Image (cartoon, helix red, strand yellow):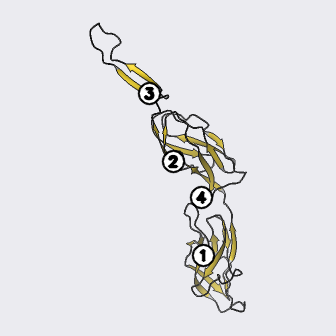
Amino acid sequence: TGSSLDLTITAYDIGNNVVTSYTGSKSLTFSGLANSPDGNIPTVEGVNLPGPVTVTFASGVSAALGATLIAAKVESTSLDVSDGTNTSNGSANYDLDLTVTVGSATKLKFTTPPPASVNAGVVWSSFAAGIFDLYGNPRISAADINTITITGDGAGSFSGTVFKAAVNGIAVFNDISYPQVGAINVTASSTGFTSTPASAVTINPGTVSYLKLTAPSSSMTTGSSLDLTITAYDIGNN
Protein backbone atom coordinates (compact mmCIF):
# COMPACT_ATOMS: atom_id res chain seq x y z
CA THR A 1 0.00 0.00 0.00
CA GLY A 2 1.09 3.55 -0.70
CA SER A 3 3.39 2.65 -3.58
CA SER A 4 2.44 3.47 -7.17
CA LEU A 5 1.79 1.13 -10.09
CA ASP A 6 1.71 2.35 -13.68
CA LEU A 7 -1.23 0.78 -15.49
CA THR A 8 -1.39 0.12 -19.22
CA ILE A 9 -4.89 0.01 -20.70
CA THR A 10 -5.33 -1.37 -24.21
CA ALA A 11 -8.45 -1.33 -26.40
CA TYR A 12 -9.17 -4.58 -28.28
CA ASP A 13 -11.83 -5.59 -30.75
CA ILE A 14 -13.77 -8.86 -30.55
CA GLY A 15 -10.99 -10.62 -32.45
CA ASN A 16 -8.33 -9.55 -29.90
CA ASN A 17 -6.81 -6.99 -32.25
CA VAL A 18 -5.66 -3.65 -30.86
CA VAL A 19 -8.05 -0.91 -32.00
CA THR A 20 -5.55 1.72 -33.18
CA SER A 21 -8.34 4.23 -33.86
CA TYR A 22 -9.08 4.39 -30.11
CA THR A 23 -7.27 7.67 -29.41
CA GLY A 24 -7.51 10.87 -27.43
CA SER A 25 -8.82 11.56 -23.93
CA LYS A 26 -11.13 8.94 -22.45
CA SER A 27 -13.18 9.15 -19.27
CA LEU A 28 -12.65 5.90 -17.39
CA THR A 29 -14.01 4.40 -14.19
CA PHE A 30 -12.29 1.71 -12.17
CA SER A 31 -13.68 -0.97 -9.86
CA GLY A 32 -12.48 -3.79 -7.64
CA LEU A 33 -10.30 -2.00 -5.08
CA ALA A 34 -11.53 -1.39 -1.53
CA ASN A 35 -10.94 1.55 0.80
CA SER A 36 -8.40 1.09 3.57
CA PRO A 37 -9.39 0.31 7.19
CA ASP A 38 -8.88 4.01 7.96
CA GLY A 39 -11.10 5.07 5.05
CA ASN A 40 -8.39 6.00 2.56
CA ILE A 41 -9.59 5.72 -1.05
CA PRO A 42 -7.47 4.19 -3.83
CA THR A 43 -6.59 6.61 -6.63
CA VAL A 44 -5.60 6.68 -10.29
CA GLU A 45 -3.76 9.82 -11.32
CA GLY A 46 -4.68 11.31 -7.96
CA VAL A 47 -8.42 10.89 -8.56
CA ASN A 48 -10.39 8.92 -5.98
CA LEU A 49 -11.82 5.74 -7.44
CA PRO A 50 -14.09 4.83 -9.04
CA GLY A 51 -13.42 8.09 -10.86
CA PRO A 52 -14.03 9.14 -13.60
CA VAL A 53 -10.37 9.52 -14.51
CA THR A 54 -9.26 11.14 -17.76
CA VAL A 55 -6.69 8.96 -19.53
CA THR A 56 -5.08 9.74 -22.89
CA PHE A 57 -4.79 7.02 -25.57
CA ALA A 58 -2.72 6.76 -28.74
CA SER A 59 -3.20 3.93 -31.22
CA GLY A 60 -5.37 2.02 -28.75
CA VAL A 61 -2.94 2.13 -25.80
CA SER A 62 -2.95 4.44 -22.79
CA ALA A 63 -0.08 6.90 -22.52
CA ALA A 64 2.96 5.85 -20.51
CA LEU A 65 2.69 7.01 -16.89
CA GLY A 66 -0.81 8.22 -17.70
CA ALA A 67 -2.74 5.90 -15.38
CA THR A 68 -0.83 5.60 -12.12
CA LEU A 69 -2.56 3.59 -9.40
CA ILE A 70 -2.13 3.95 -5.63
CA ALA A 71 -3.91 1.26 -3.61
CA ALA A 72 -4.89 1.69 0.05
CA LYS A 73 -6.04 -1.70 1.39
CA VAL A 74 -4.16 -4.97 1.75
CA GLU A 75 -6.05 -7.44 -0.44
CA SER A 76 -5.97 -9.79 -3.40
CA THR A 77 -8.46 -8.56 -5.96
CA SER A 78 -9.20 -7.92 -9.62
CA LEU A 79 -9.09 -4.39 -11.02
CA ASP A 80 -11.50 -3.57 -13.85
CA VAL A 81 -11.86 -0.51 -16.06
CA SER A 82 -14.73 0.86 -18.17
CA ASP A 83 -15.28 3.78 -20.52
CA GLY A 84 -19.06 3.49 -20.15
CA THR A 85 -19.43 1.34 -23.26
CA ASN A 86 -16.47 -0.98 -23.21
CA THR A 87 -15.23 -2.77 -20.12
CA SER A 88 -12.61 -5.25 -18.91
CA ASN A 89 -15.01 -7.37 -16.86
CA GLY A 90 -16.14 -9.54 -19.75
CA SER A 91 -13.42 -12.09 -19.10
CA ALA A 92 -10.94 -12.96 -16.37
CA ASN A 93 -8.25 -12.46 -19.03
CA TYR A 94 -9.12 -8.78 -19.42
CA ASP A 95 -8.88 -7.49 -15.85
CA LEU A 96 -5.76 -7.06 -13.72
CA ASP A 97 -5.29 -9.58 -10.91
CA LEU A 98 -3.62 -7.58 -8.17
CA THR A 99 -2.09 -8.44 -4.80
CA VAL A 100 -1.66 -5.44 -2.49
CA THR A 101 0.75 -5.94 0.43
CA VAL A 102 1.11 -3.90 3.60
CA GLY A 103 3.14 -0.69 3.54
CA SER A 104 5.83 0.55 5.90
CA ALA A 105 5.02 0.72 9.60
CA THR A 106 4.13 4.29 10.52
CA LYS A 107 1.64 4.42 13.38
CA LEU A 108 0.03 2.72 16.36
CA LYS A 109 -3.63 1.99 17.00
CA PHE A 110 -5.45 0.27 19.83
CA THR A 111 -6.61 -3.08 18.44
CA THR A 112 -8.47 -3.67 21.71
CA PRO A 113 -9.03 -0.37 23.52
CA PRO A 114 -8.52 0.06 27.26
CA PRO A 115 -11.72 -0.48 29.27
CA ALA A 116 -13.89 2.64 29.47
CA SER A 117 -14.60 2.25 33.19
CA VAL A 118 -12.50 0.58 35.91
CA ASN A 119 -12.13 0.55 39.67
CA ALA A 120 -9.12 2.15 41.33
CA GLY A 121 -6.41 -0.35 42.23
CA VAL A 122 -8.05 -3.21 40.34
CA VAL A 123 -6.31 -4.85 37.36
CA TRP A 124 -7.94 -3.82 34.08
CA SER A 125 -9.18 -6.24 31.48
CA SER A 126 -6.56 -6.86 28.79
CA PHE A 127 -6.12 -4.35 25.99
CA ALA A 128 -3.72 -4.20 23.06
CA ALA A 129 -1.95 -1.79 20.74
CA GLY A 130 -0.70 -2.68 17.27
CA ILE A 131 1.60 -1.44 14.53
CA PHE A 132 -0.03 -0.24 11.30
CA ASP A 133 0.92 1.26 7.97
CA LEU A 134 -0.10 4.76 6.89
CA TYR A 135 -3.53 3.58 5.74
CA GLY A 136 -4.41 1.57 8.85
CA ASN A 137 -3.50 -1.88 7.54
CA PRO A 138 -2.04 -4.02 10.35
CA ARG A 139 1.57 -5.08 10.33
CA ILE A 140 1.58 -8.73 11.41
CA SER A 141 5.15 -9.69 10.58
CA ALA A 142 7.42 -11.40 13.10
CA ALA A 143 9.82 -8.52 12.40
CA ASP A 144 7.41 -6.02 13.97
CA ILE A 145 8.69 -6.35 17.54
CA ASN A 146 9.04 -2.70 18.59
CA THR A 147 8.53 -1.86 22.25
CA ILE A 148 5.22 -0.11 22.88
CA THR A 149 4.66 2.02 25.99
CA ILE A 150 1.38 3.16 27.55
CA THR A 151 1.02 6.45 29.38
CA GLY A 152 -1.82 8.35 31.05
CA ASP A 153 -2.37 12.05 31.64
CA GLY A 154 -3.55 11.73 35.25
CA ALA A 155 -1.65 12.57 38.45
CA GLY A 156 -1.21 8.92 39.40
CA SER A 157 1.05 6.25 37.98
CA PHE A 158 0.16 2.93 36.42
CA SER A 159 0.93 -0.29 38.20
CA GLY A 160 1.88 -3.24 36.04
CA THR A 161 4.03 -3.62 32.92
CA VAL A 162 3.73 -0.44 30.85
CA PHE A 163 6.48 -1.47 28.37
CA LYS A 164 5.67 -4.41 26.10
CA ALA A 165 7.43 -5.76 23.02
CA ALA A 166 5.07 -6.30 20.12
CA VAL A 167 4.62 -9.90 18.96
CA ASN A 168 3.67 -10.06 15.28
CA GLY A 169 2.89 -6.36 15.49
CA ILE A 170 0.69 -6.51 18.62
CA ALA A 171 1.53 -5.66 22.26
CA VAL A 172 -0.92 -6.93 24.90
CA PHE A 173 -1.23 -5.20 28.29
CA ASN A 174 -2.82 -7.52 30.84
CA ASP A 175 -1.67 -6.41 34.31
CA ILE A 176 -2.40 -2.68 34.36
CA SER A 177 -4.13 -0.86 37.23
CA TYR A 178 -4.40 2.77 38.31
CA PRO A 179 -4.64 3.99 41.90
CA GLN A 180 -6.51 7.28 41.75
CA VAL A 181 -10.17 8.06 41.12
CA GLY A 182 -10.82 10.34 38.14
CA ALA A 183 -10.75 10.43 34.36
CA ILE A 184 -7.59 9.86 32.33
CA ASN A 185 -6.63 9.53 28.70
CA VAL A 186 -4.48 6.52 27.83
CA THR A 187 -2.05 6.59 24.89
CA ALA A 188 0.30 3.99 23.42
CA SER A 189 3.55 5.16 21.87
CA SER A 190 6.76 3.83 20.35
CA THR A 191 9.85 5.54 18.98
CA GLY A 192 9.47 6.41 15.32
CA PHE A 193 5.70 5.92 15.14
CA THR A 194 2.65 8.15 15.43
CA SER A 195 1.03 7.43 18.80
CA THR A 196 -2.46 6.02 19.19
CA PRO A 197 -5.37 8.41 19.57
CA ALA A 198 -6.08 8.90 23.29
CA SER A 199 -8.57 6.49 24.85
CA ALA A 200 -10.67 7.83 27.74
CA VAL A 201 -10.87 5.77 30.94
CA THR A 202 -12.93 6.59 34.02
CA ILE A 203 -11.49 5.32 37.32
CA ASN A 204 -14.12 4.72 39.99
CA PRO A 205 -13.57 4.09 43.69
CA GLY A 206 -12.80 0.47 44.48
CA THR A 207 -14.46 -1.71 47.09
CA VAL A 208 -14.18 -0.64 50.73
CA SER A 209 -10.83 -1.63 52.26
CA TYR A 210 -11.00 0.22 55.58
CA LEU A 211 -12.89 2.81 57.63
CA LYS A 212 -11.21 5.94 58.97
CA LEU A 213 -12.47 7.83 62.03
CA THR A 214 -11.79 11.58 62.36
CA ALA A 215 -13.03 14.44 64.56
CA PRO A 216 -12.48 18.21 64.72
CA SER A 217 -10.53 17.81 67.96
CA SER A 218 -8.43 15.16 69.61
CA SER A 219 -9.47 16.22 73.15
CA MET A 220 -12.76 16.80 74.94
CA THR A 221 -14.17 17.13 78.45
CA THR A 222 -16.48 14.62 80.04
CA GLY A 223 -20.11 15.25 79.24
CA SER A 224 -19.38 17.37 76.16
CA SER A 225 -20.14 16.23 72.62
CA LEU A 226 -17.78 15.50 69.74
CA ASP A 227 -18.95 15.09 66.16
CA LEU A 228 -17.29 12.10 64.56
CA THR A 229 -16.70 11.59 60.81
CA ILE A 230 -16.40 8.04 59.54
CA THR A 231 -15.10 7.65 55.95
CA ALA A 232 -14.88 4.49 53.85
CA TYR A 233 -11.73 4.15 51.72
CA ASP A 234 -10.64 1.70 49.06
CA ILE A 235 -7.17 0.13 48.90
CA GLY A 236 -5.83 3.14 47.01
CA ASN A 237 -6.99 5.59 49.72
CA ASN A 238 -9.81 6.90 47.57
- Where is residue 192? Give x, y as percent: 63, 49
Q: Residue 31 got which mark?
A: 1
Task: Answer with the quarter of the image where residue 98 lies.
Answer: bottom right
Residue wearing tag 3: 233
Dot 2 amino acid type: Ala
Dot 1 amino acid type: Ser
Residue wearing tag 2: 198
Q: Is residue 139 above or below residue 155?
A: below
- Where is residue 161? Give x, y as percent: 62, 37
Spatial CA span between label 3 and label 1: 62 Å
Q: Residue at x 54, y 63 (%)?
A: 39
Residue wearing tag 4: 136
Spatial CA span between label 1 and label 4: 21 Å
Q: Earlier in the sequence, mark 2 or mark 3?
A: 2
Observer-side mark, 2 or 3, equals 3
Q: Nearer the viewer, residue 71 or 213?
A: 213
